[in-house]
Image (spheres, rainbow, N blue to C red):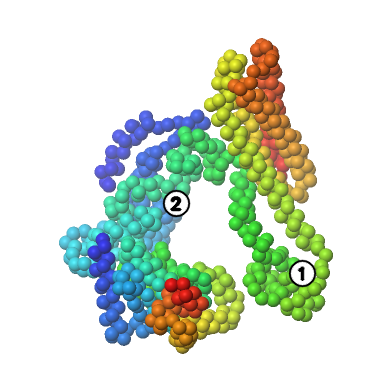
Amino acid sequence: MQKTQTNRLNKELQDFNERQKKGEDSGISILLVDQNITHWKGFINGPSDTPYSNGYFQVDIVIPQEYPYKPPKMKFDTRIWHPNISSQTGAICLDILKDEWSPALSIRTALLSLQALLCDPQPDSPQDAVVANQYKTQKDLFVKTAKEWTQNYASKNKQEEKVQNLVNLGFEVGKVREALLRFGYDEEQAANFLLGG
Amino acid sequence: MGDDQYNYEDDYDSMQIEKQYSLQGVEILDIKDVIQEIRKDILELQEQLYFDEDNTFELLMHYNWDKEEITQKYFTNSEALLADLRMKGIVNNHDKIIFNGLKGCCSVCFVEGNLIELGCTHKFCESCIEQTIKQRVYQDKFLIVRCLQNGCNYRLPFSMIKRYSNDQEFENLLCRRFVDCSRYLAYCTGVDCNKILKPQYSSVKEVTCVCQNKFCFYCKEDLHPPCPCDLVKKWLAEIKKDEANVRWIVVNTKSCPFCKKPVERSEGCNYMMCKPPGGCGKAFCYICSQPWEPDHKDHFKCNKYVAPTANIEKEKEVLQRYNFYYERFLNSQAAKEKAMQRLKQIKEQYLTSIFKHYQFTYQDSQFLEEVMKELIQSRVVLKWSYCIGYYISKTNQQSAKLFDHYQEIFEHACETLAISLIKLFDEIEKLDHTQSDKPIHEQKKDFIEKKERIQNASQKCCKMRQNLEVAIYQGEIYM
């Protein structure tokens, strides 16, 4: 079991890298956490023509023992204002990550589905009721808030600014990046973590 | 699978012998019994429609085991039904499955080896199919497993699912599904009991399992005489909602003065908009709960003193009214629990004490158990009468008055009985520790007198209880 899983995950990684080289799959990328094949970080570029454009979103991916017969556990590390993603915890409501998972899907296709979800929110099966309600009743305000959140939490410039801020406080740059990644670029939480640890 | 169908009759006889019957005409079934019924259903329908076993199973699952609906639809327009079922992936061509002779790379685990081609022509290795089935059946508790290919509607045949999943787990799930669909069967609601009950008559409402658990067969809740099931459901939902929400709502929200919906202020100024679509769209002040227009100018200040308005009073009244009934409902529940403990004590302790001191035999003291059972029953009826009291129609004055009257005298009779019992129990408990000055024959006489008084009180309580029940069952009291 464990062996077949490792085999499959290695194949997935290989496939991912090949596609990256060929320039397919623009807008998604991955990284292993601590060289652990069952804990990945995925990155999604916010699709253009959406409030998430110019955003760079980080997704935490934990691969359960039963993978690929059971879906991977995914949640957003970067805070995001979206009807199907919790604004508090980053939990995602997407059918293929739950009952509609199929073993023929992969981490790559799941990330692509998430990217599609950013283009095409489903307010009728919401994860975050407040956001979904706003999406339905006050679209303008929704777009405005989602843009603001993208600016604040997901833009490269802003992220660099936050790195600089914490470095200026006297923390080591590598540790700062690590802490910010860990808390989805929430500066305060990252600072607390750095102070505590 | 095919072989199993033909020898079930043999099993069936031995099953009959083991079958247990409870006192009230309720048959207690085993999982095996239910599985037999399921097989019988499949076989019957299979012969009627000329379907194979796998597709018959899917059909029954899809229509919640409603055989009449299936045959009716089938014989009205079989072609349309089949086309629809095929499109939805419920009826499939399983004959095309190829188990042997195919080799290649499995698209799920990327391992080279033997492949199985499913009826939809997608191919996977046996191990991946097995793992997928196990995951679905064991972990997700599903009986339907779709093709491993994303977006493919094809369902794996149930004989395949059965083969690769653990038999017991599969049968458990199947049995639960069947029982849940059936109007004639129910799982016992007792903790860890899992027995399946089948009343002999469909009119049986209150059932008792061999584990002594009693419940309402219709709504699967604890017994709730004289309250109808729909009110019980409403009331329990109200309680659940209440426990989770009321405290939070009271602390964190204000009611919109226009539409009465609770409105939450997360942060910000006093200007509150009761937001549509949930709310009415009007604005009010968070401090004084008055309409924003025309008095309020400043978003952060409100110095206006407001006398409590009729609205606020009315809301309080609604809450108080609910609390009134809920409190009494809970008290009766607690009193019933205590009475149950007493019943246990009677059996384990009091009867022995009575025999030791007065030499009364079981026949003389058995009345205690009977009376205690009456008290328990009355506590249950009293408890549910508060639910009725909460929902009783206020438009029909006559019925409300009648209810109040019956409930009041019943409650009084019930309390009288409870008090006289407690006094007697106190005395019985003292028997082992203190010596009475009275000669034994007088003590005996006293006890007999008390016994008669208590029996009278119990009869009265029973009569008052029945009066209330009859008035409700016969529709003199409206809900």
Give the labeled residue for mark 2: B64
Kindly identify the residue that appears in the image at 67 percent across and 36 percent down: B469
| B360 w.r.t. B33: above or below | above
Q: How crowded is mark 2: few (under 14 residues within 10 Å), some or many (20 or more)?
A: some
Kindly identify the residue that appears in the image at 75 percent across and 55 percent down: B317
| B73 w.r.t. A166: above or below | above
Give left or right: position of B345 versus A37.
right
Name the kind of residue labelled 1 in the image: Cys
Extreme-front residue of the structure: A170
Q: Disc 1 vs disc 2: Cβ atoms closer than 8 Å?
A: no
Give the labeled residue for mark 1: B288
Give left or right: position of B311 versus A166.
right
In-front residue for pair B2/B381: B381
Name the kind of residue labelled 2 in the image: Asn
Give left or right: position of A153 versus B32.
right
Kindly identify the residue that appears in the image at 19 percent across and 62 percent down: B114
Kindly identify the residue that appears in the image at 60 percent across and 49 percent down: B236
Q: Position of residue B406 (x, y in %)?
A: 74, 37
| A146 w.r.t. A96: above or below | below
Q: Distance between the residues labelled 1 and 2?
A: 54 Å
How many marks do you count on the picture?
A: 2
Q: Where is residue B58 in the image (x, y as percent from the top left)?
A: 37, 54
Give left or right: position of A160 versus B103.
right
Q: Where is residue A181 in the image (x, y as percent from the top left)?
A: 42, 77
Can residue A38 be seen here? The reply is yes
